[in-house]
Image (tube, grey):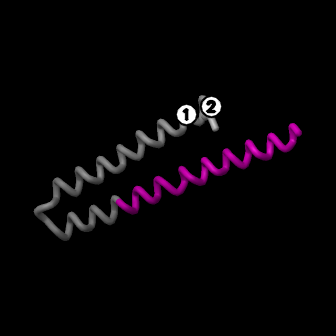
């Protein structure tokens, strides 16, 4: 399976955005390591933000596959 231009762009942006989310979360936790309750709160909040970022990403990607599958069905 090869990726077309839009899929490559989507994957590239997704990977970059994932690194931004994870990197900023790690930096927030590292900065607040002296304050254990705050660091734990930031770690949980960061995991939640990552999950909130990831779920729509997968949903939109699957929706694109379904639209492509339906469009191909109409062409056949």
The main secondary structure of the magenta stretch is helix
Quick check: 67 above or below 44? above
Q: Secondary structure at mark 1?
A: helix
In the rendered structure, the answer to whether residue 49 lies left or right of residue 55 reads left
In which quadrant will I find the N terminus? top right
Residues at badges 2 and 1 in contact (C-beta under 8 Å)?
Answer: yes
Q: Residue furthest top?
A: 5
Point out which mark residue 4 bears: 2
Question: Alpha-carbon neighbours of circle 2 within 10 Å: few (<14), some, or many (≥20)?
Answer: few
Q: Nearer the viewer, residue 7 or 1?
A: 1
Which type of secondary structure does the marked residue at label 2 adopt?
loop
Q: Quadrant of residue 41?
A: bottom left
Q: Position of residue 74 (x, y in %)?
A: 87, 42
Quick one: quadrant of the C terminus? top right
Residue 68 position in % (x across, y down): 74, 42
Q: Residue at position x 23%, y 50% from top?
A: 27
């Amino acid at each position: 399976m090869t990726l077309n231009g839009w899929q490559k762009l989507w994957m590239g942006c997704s990977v970059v955005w994932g690194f931004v989310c994870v990197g900023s979360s790690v930096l927030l936790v590292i900065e607040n390591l002296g304050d254990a309750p705050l660091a734990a709160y930031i770690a949980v909040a960061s995991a939640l933000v990552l999950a909130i970022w990831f779920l729509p990403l997968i949903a939109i990607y699957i929706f694109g596959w379904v639209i492509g599958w339906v469009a191909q069905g109409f062409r056949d």
